[in-house]
Image (cartoon, rainbow, N blue to C red):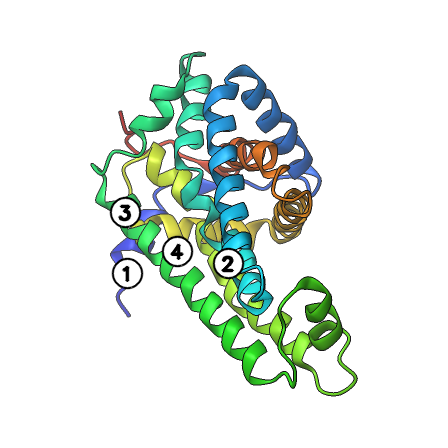
């Protein structure tokens, strides 16, 4: 059977194997980048925190919607961090970066990033709708706040609603994570198609299942910790993880043989 051109493209270069605790090193490198050029990161973090606060205020009496929306944030986060990948890239190449570096990454001149962003947005929307339908359709009482979510969904006496909710979230989140963990930094950095970047991301996960499982847990745990501080923690967590994700990509993918994007 003839192989996909995108799969052939992704095999033009290799992926690397890293130690299982290497994600901690990505966090250290990401924090270093954040401290070297804090303004773009802080602005991204403030936007994320304000958006989360507005979402909470608008849907404050509909936690069945909020639970899906906040977990959906983890799905679309990689595309939100595009400007900060550009900052880390500039720091690595030239040792200099500023707010303009991040803003230039958002110019709609690259259809590949737009396509990938739309796909992530569709996946996030699909999970929000699925989560809302599941919680509203299978609970006997309204779920309007975190306490009711805990009582009615998490600690329900009968049924397996919470387990089903978690399982469906995992079924969606796992392939999205595997498809995007290095894909967006790769698209920003090198000349490669969207499917080629996705295949590369899957190769990285299959080569490093334990380090990437740890990385996924760190991303989820730190993001949830940022949300738990009434969104204030996202001001720091969002840029920190974005810069760290760039270093994950640089560690995991050997891009020799791929043309570099200007």
Label 4, secondary structure: give it: helix
175, 87: nearer the viewer: 87
113 in relation to 160, above or below: above
- Identified at 63% across, 73% down, the residue is 143
- Identified at 70% across, 82% down, the residue is 160
- Identified at 65% across, 49% down, the residue is 224
Who comes first in sequence, dot 2 or dot 3? 2
Nearer the observer, disc 2 or disc 3? 2
Who comes first in sequence, dot 1 or dot 3? 1
82, 183: nearer the viewer: 82
Q: Which residue is mark 4?
A: 120
Q: Which residue is mark 1?
A: 4
Who comes first in sequence, dot 4 or dot 3? 3
Q: Which residue is mark 3?
A: 114
Marks 4 and 1 in Cβ contact (< 8 Å): no
Q: Which residue is mark 2?
A: 72
Q: CA distance from mark 1 to mark 2?
A: 30 Å
Q: Quadrant of the C terminus?
A: top left
Nearer the observer, disc 4 or disc 2? 2
In percent of width and height, residue 144 lies at: 62, 68
Q: Is residue 153 left or right of residue 26?
A: right
């Amino acid at each position: 059977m003839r192989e996909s051109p995108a799969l052939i493209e992704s095999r033009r270069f290799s992926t690397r194997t890293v130690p299982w605790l290497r994600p901690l090193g990505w966090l250290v490198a990401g924090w270093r980048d954040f401290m070297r050029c804090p303004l773009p990161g802080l602005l991204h973090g403030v936007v994320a925190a304000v958006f989360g606060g507005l979402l909470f205020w608008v849907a404050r009496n509909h936690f069945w919607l909020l639970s899906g929306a906040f977990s959906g944030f983890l799905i679309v986060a990689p595309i939100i961090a595009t400007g900060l990948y550009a900052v880390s890239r500039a720091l690595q190449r030239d040792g200099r970066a500023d707010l303009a570096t991040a803003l230039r990454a958002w110019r709609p001149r690259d259809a590949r990033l737009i396509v990938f962003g739309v796909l992530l947005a569709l996946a996030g929307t699909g999970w929000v709708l699925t989560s809302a339908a599941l919680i509203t359709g299978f609970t006997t009482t309204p779920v309007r706040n975190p306490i009711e979510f805990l009582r009615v969904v998490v600690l329900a006496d009968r049924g397996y609603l919470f387990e089903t909710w978690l399982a469906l979230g995992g079924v969606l989140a796992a392939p999205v994570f595997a498809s995007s963990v290095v894909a967006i930094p790769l698209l920003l950095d090198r000349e490669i198609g969207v499917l080629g970047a996705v295949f590369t991301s899957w190769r990285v996960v299959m080569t490093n299942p334990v380090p990437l499982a740890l990385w996924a847990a760190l991303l989820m745990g730190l993001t949830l910790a940022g949300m738990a501080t009434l969104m204030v923690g996202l001001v720091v967590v969002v840029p920190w993880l974005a810069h760290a994700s760039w270093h994950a990509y640089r560690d995991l993918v050997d891009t020799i043989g791929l043309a570099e994007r200007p």
